[in-house]
Amino acid sequence: MKHLLSTADLSRTEAIDLLDTAEEMSLVSTQEVKKLPVLRGLTVVNLFFEDSTRTRISFEAAAKRLSADVITFSAKGSSVSKGESLQDTAQTLSAMGADGVVIRHSGSGAPHRLATSGWIDAPVVNAGDGTHEHPTQALLDAFTLRRVLAGLPASGPADGARGLGLDGAVVGIVGDILHSRVARSNVHLLTTLGARVVLIAPPTLLPIGADSWDCDIAYDLDEAIAEHSFDALMMLRVQQERMQQAFFPTAREYARRWGLTDLRVRALPSHCAIMHPGPMNRGFEIGAAAADSPRAVVLDQVANGVSVRMSVLYRLLTGQSAATGGREGQS
Amino acid sequence: MNSTLIRAARMPDGTRADIAIVDGVFADPADAASPSTVVDADGLLALPGLVDMHTHLREPGREDAETILTGSRAAAAGGYTAVHAMANTSPVADTAGVVEQVHRLGRAAGFTQVVPVGAVTVGLAGSTLAELGAMADSEARVRMFSDDGHCVWDPLVMRRALEYVKAFDGIIAQHAQEPRLTEGAQMNEGAVSAQLGLPGWPAVAEESIIARDVLLAEHVGSRLHVCHVSTAGSVELIRWAKARGIRVTAEVTPHHLLLTDEEVRSYDPVFKVNPPLRTDEDVRALRAALADGTIDVVGTDHAPHPAEHKCVEWTAAAMGMVGMETALPVVAHAMADHDFSAADLARVMSARPAQIAGLAHHGSLEIGTGANLVLVDPDAAHTVDPDAHATMGRNNPFRGRTLGTRIVDTFLFGRRVYASGALGTPLEFAEAGPWND
């Protein structure tokens, strides 16, 4: 594994290996000194062509906990807004000595282009590209789900999840599938790990061609809740600007039909975890009862994001993993 | 008297014959008893010079991408003796002045007959008709009008344009793309776009415009030409319209006959084009339609772009591919399963486009017509190397592919503008000759 561009590229073994390494990494956060020396002397460049404070600081924290030097490059106010190309930006950073590049871009495929064009040699991590994929988000979702399914704390140090997949789990993903890179990455990854994914959305927010995906599709959330015994329900953020594009009539109608209202929370199986990649639109795709429910694992997802990103950076920059060396790789 | 004798060429009908050229027109070999030039065409196929109804030569305005000279050289190297230069230049070719400039620069280049296409609407903006009559009456004698790159979306403007050009037997060439359905579109909408997360360009955006336009053409009794047909549904609509007697003609590009949206998985913008690469089912339908005549012609939609518009991420890249220098080998290759003969190649790449565009001196090998001819080695496997091409555009999607047909010689009104696989000497259009007819 040279890059992490898409979860479709991950085998079950590779995915479980990354999650197991992330389990190791989660222990670091409990140490007095929250640092491992494994990437000492290496430079990780965060190339953020699109604003995303949450993902950026999560990657920064991950790299720093592995003792890497971190350079963050935000496109706003930089040469990119003055017409510098992705090629020139990449090559400039490469000349400065980047050992790994984390890229966030509004255009689908930009990380793929960076990794395959020959512009740079360093491993590339896709931190979200357009409406394509967001692999580390799917990994942190899988990590969280694996904990929940095993009856373990959703975040923090815990023993017992290592080596497991998500076999038999049923996960609903609700909302704007069309524009969601999180949904695409999760369909691949959760399915690879043995879960069954059900996408629930208005037909306008499902891509033409989604029927070829390895998952179920439903339009009616209440019917889906009644039909499936969900182990987790993942609510996707709906961007405000979709309202102006005739994807659905009004925010109120959307909330009534596809929002996780208090009534729907009560209809869910008692063990069902409530997930959201954040930031949440309270009262729109998710109600207060759901967001504040003890079954909501939204903050655990955030915490696990750092562990998972540590695992990915460690794997790509050292070529090692839990299976090939794990914590012994520290020395 | 300037005469050339081409010996023992294989003709489109499969026979072998000598071809004589006297003073720029085809002549009876008996009248060229002591030719000034003799070309041995043993083993070569003779086709009437190819006619491209669809190129972008970029001049005036984007001379960093292509000029009329470099585009004309690419035409000669591709076997094209006439090319139509689309109007989306800067300034737009929407006045007699601009089309005359293009016409003049084409004659000065001398490697192919450059036929300017006039814009349908001022600035390609789709709202006000350009001075179509002035362009028709100009030195450039424009007969084909197109807002290519943009759809004449307004049904009333389209109706008026179709009606208006009847006065001088003009034809409207439509770029069929419903604009609202394709806002921000990046590739064909389907299973691949769903997975790649790229905004889709649905087939219905092309088909709905074609359906409307054939009905408009029927209503006003005008000629309609549909540019770069790309979907199976469009083929069905055109087949229906032709059966109904509507005067519609249609074009397909070489790339839509060979490539599918699977190529987009590479996110390499060399495969970004408008209309987008479609599915395998569409490719099959297009090939069948070209074979049975539902689609009349192959047009290249040759669209050179400078490297900086392609060496970027997919979503930022320009749409378009170059194609004049690979068109004939690509079409021969793509149509191999359809028992597509040399006569069929001559029909779709020369005779029909010449007929639709009204170019009397192109499209045939008949005695007395312009000596526009291409000699082709039909069995010369070679690897496509865009860096060696005459066009300035390196955005050729067939890079690295092995193709079987090679252009050997191109004769433009008897002048060997491409000779034994290399550029020859240009034709002096300024002199008297049949090209001034």
Image (cartoon, grey):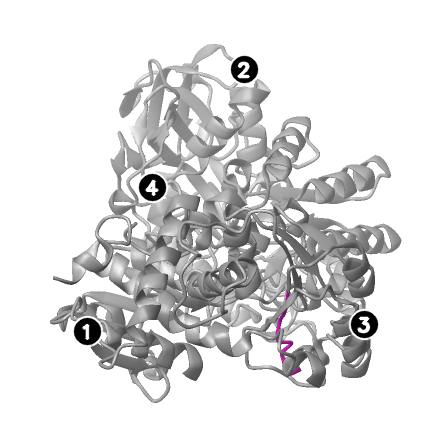
Q: Residue at x 25, y 75 (%)?
A: A65
Callout 1: chain: A
Q: Position of residue B77 (x, y in %)?
A: 34, 40
Find residue A133 and report its horizontal and vertical position in percent: 48, 61
Is disc 2 in the same subunit as disc 3? no
Does the magenta-highlighted stretch encompass residue A236? Answer: yes
On the question of residue B286 being in view, the answer is yes
The 10 Å Cα crowd at callout 3, few under 14, some 14 to 19, many 20 or more, is some
In the image, is B297 to the left or to the right of A223?
left
Q: Which residue is mark 3?
A: A257
Q: SS class of the residue under badge 1?
A: loop
Cα–Cα gap, marks 1 and 3? 46 Å
Amino acid type, callout 3: Arg
Q: Quadrant of residue B256?
A: top right
Q: Where A76 sits versus B111, above or below?
A: below
For mark 2, what is the residue? B13
Q: Nearer the viewer, residue B59 or B405?
A: B405
The residue indicated by pointer 4 is B399
Q: Where is residue A295 drawn, in percent x and y?
A: 62, 73
As measured in the structure, the alpha-carbon distance from the residue carrying label 4 to the one carrying label 2 is 32 Å
Is residue B145 depicted above or below B420 in this figure?
below
State which quarter of the image contains the N terminus of chain B: top left
Q: Which residue is mark 1?
A: A68
Q: Is residue B372 visible?
A: no
Which circle's residue, 1 or 3, is located before the other in the chain? 1
Q: Secondary structure at mark 3?
A: helix
- Chain letter for the residue marked with disc 3 in the picture: A
Tell us which disc is closer to us: 2 or 3: 3
Question: How many numbered badges does the structure rendering display?
Answer: 4
Cβ–Cβ under 8 Å for marks 4 and 3: no
Camera-nearest label, 1 or 2? 1
